[in-house]
Image: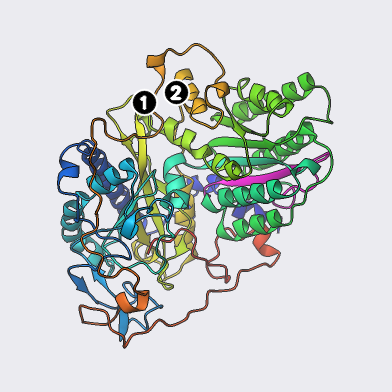
Amino acid sequence: MLFQKIILRSFIPLLASSFFVNAGEEAFLELVEKVENDVLELAAMVTDLYKDRCTTALNDCSKNNFHECVSSFPDQTCPGGEQLGDKKCGDDVTCSRLWDYSISRVSLPEKVADGQHENPTDPEVIETICFSRKLDEWFKNKHEKEKPFWDQYALEIPPMYFGAHNGVFRIYPAYRSSDCGAYDPTKRPWYIGGSSGNKNLLLILDVSGSMNGEKIETMKLAAERIVETLNVGDRIAIIPFSDDANQTIADDGTYMYVASEVNKNILIDELKKLSAGGATNFRAGFRRAYEIFNNTYKKEFHVDCNSAVLFLTDGKMTAGGTKEDVMSFIIDGIEDMEQKTGHTVSLFTYSIGGGETVEIPYELSCSVTTGVWSKIENEFQILESLTSYYTLFSLGLGIDKNQNFTAWVEPYLYADGVSVGTTVSAPVYDTSKTPHLFLGVVGLDLRLAAIDIALGVDKGSTDTLDRVIRRSTAKCPTLENTLCELESFRRRGSAGASAMCTNNCRAEDFVDIEPEKCPAIDEYPKDLWDNIDEEGMSYEDTACCIVGTTSASEVCPVIETKMPVKDTSSSSKTGLWIGIGVGAMVIAAGVI
């Protein structure tokens, strides 16, 4: 059992193993190179188009885009078949869903689509929709050019997409969404992986008595969101503390979890059980966090990449020693993690409220190499603050050393309810800025069936799963931030300039952290959608079709499908890093 647990927890040592080398090695490597090059080509295309966002991109943008649920699409087909079907519509033989290969379509989170007919009003969001519209020609040409390559695998060409930092999502080919306004790319594992790389994550959360009520409930929700964004290339442990740290959420209570879908469900279930009570002992929380990391490191269960420690408290330290002793203990622990891993360890501290609750978290952030303090004025800011840690990672990832960085996510069940695949993603930057300005992430879906064929193994083989898992941990980006880049990030938060640690940066030394609207533009297009013919119509009335036709049909109603039951057996806690084959497959990072 111990041997099994070590193998399943630790993927890095397998990278050099010859066990997986087989006759399909060359074909597999060709497939990997092909997919990664395609996603990097798409990232470069977005970067090029961004340069024209303030000029030609706005000129012909009005009524020239297609919305996921409001617009009808101009050239739809109903090809059917398992790869292009949707179990919500039928059996994929008689009834399937519509696709349009002549255009891409746009989806927006509900909070962004704040104008009439689901239009956005934010100028920078409008700019993103307008400049990314120019991807359509590239998408169509790529689709035609790549068809022979994917024909050898008897597969359709993978969907391609761009998720912007502001929530805009553009995907090709176009298809109707079944959950309008719900998709936010910035919360998806493929996006987080592409913008931050693999990481070890320690969440140290105050659950003392003063956190009772809305504070702890909001904090738990924020922690859940963080867990949901992780993928199998990440490691995580959650350390709640009060006067002790006995509610630790860790694998066997000892190691960091591999952030597989099965383990993420375990983490979320345990988070829901947390309750508040007791004193506030910072030392207890950090001591337990360091113990868990060191246990994980000694067994080589960690990921050989960057780390982040997130520490949230709302109270004055009331136990654990003097301020000086506790701060020294915490700082030494961060430095020890950096020395052991040889990678960046970022410390994010969060204070709820003011006064003495601010002092230690702020001073800690300024006492380590990469530290950021945020002041949270109310419960509603907890969610936004805790989930923004990866923005600093994306800032550091933009250096030239990471130019060809790509990320792979854990295999998952696509939203069609049938196909299983992974997503390969890459970050996109405005390279005209120094440092490069993060714009978003591009992605390309890859069905596991293609990898099965390339490896020469049976459909659903564990060899294929192993390859994808190991690919997800194979790359670690270098994170580098100058002092003034770090100060720029610090002052962007709710605490503003008071979160800064020095006065050494001149006005011209500060950098942009997020894209801003184009200067000197007063009038933006207001009606972005080509038409609003399907506004308010149901999914079955607009997407489900008879195979071989070109429009929706009422003959093909939605058919309810049951999702597999989550595996809660004890083996899932220690060994199952992937849910396929054990009844734990869930739609987690799915796009189609």
| Quadrant of image for the N terminus | bottom right
In the image, residue 142 lies at what x, y percent? 19, 55
Q: Name the residue beneath numbered marker 2.
A: 485
The residue drawn where x is 61% and y is 25% is 365
The residue drawn where x is 69% and y is 53% is 271
Front one among 546 and 25? 546
Does the stretch in magenta take in 29? Answer: no
In this picture, residue 407 sits left or right of residue 58: right
Marker disc for residue 435: 1
In this picture, residue 127 sits left or right of residue 25: left
Main SS, magenta region, reads loop
The residue drawn where x is 15% and y is 48% is 60
Q: Is residue 304 above or below residue 39?
A: above
Marker disc for residue 426: none
In the image, residue 346 lies at what x, y percent? 57, 31
Asked whether the viewer can see residue 256, the reply is no
Bin the neighbour count of mark 1 within 10 Å (Cα to Cα): few under 14, some 14-19, many 20 and up.
many
Residue 495 position by quadrant: top right
Residue stretch in magenta: 230-253
Q: Are marks 2 and 1 in contact (CB under 8 Å)?
A: yes
Instruction: Name the element at disc 1.
Output: loop
Instruction: Name the element at disc 2.
Output: helix
Q: Is residue 6 above or below residue 176?
A: above
The kind of residue on which mark 2 rests is Glu
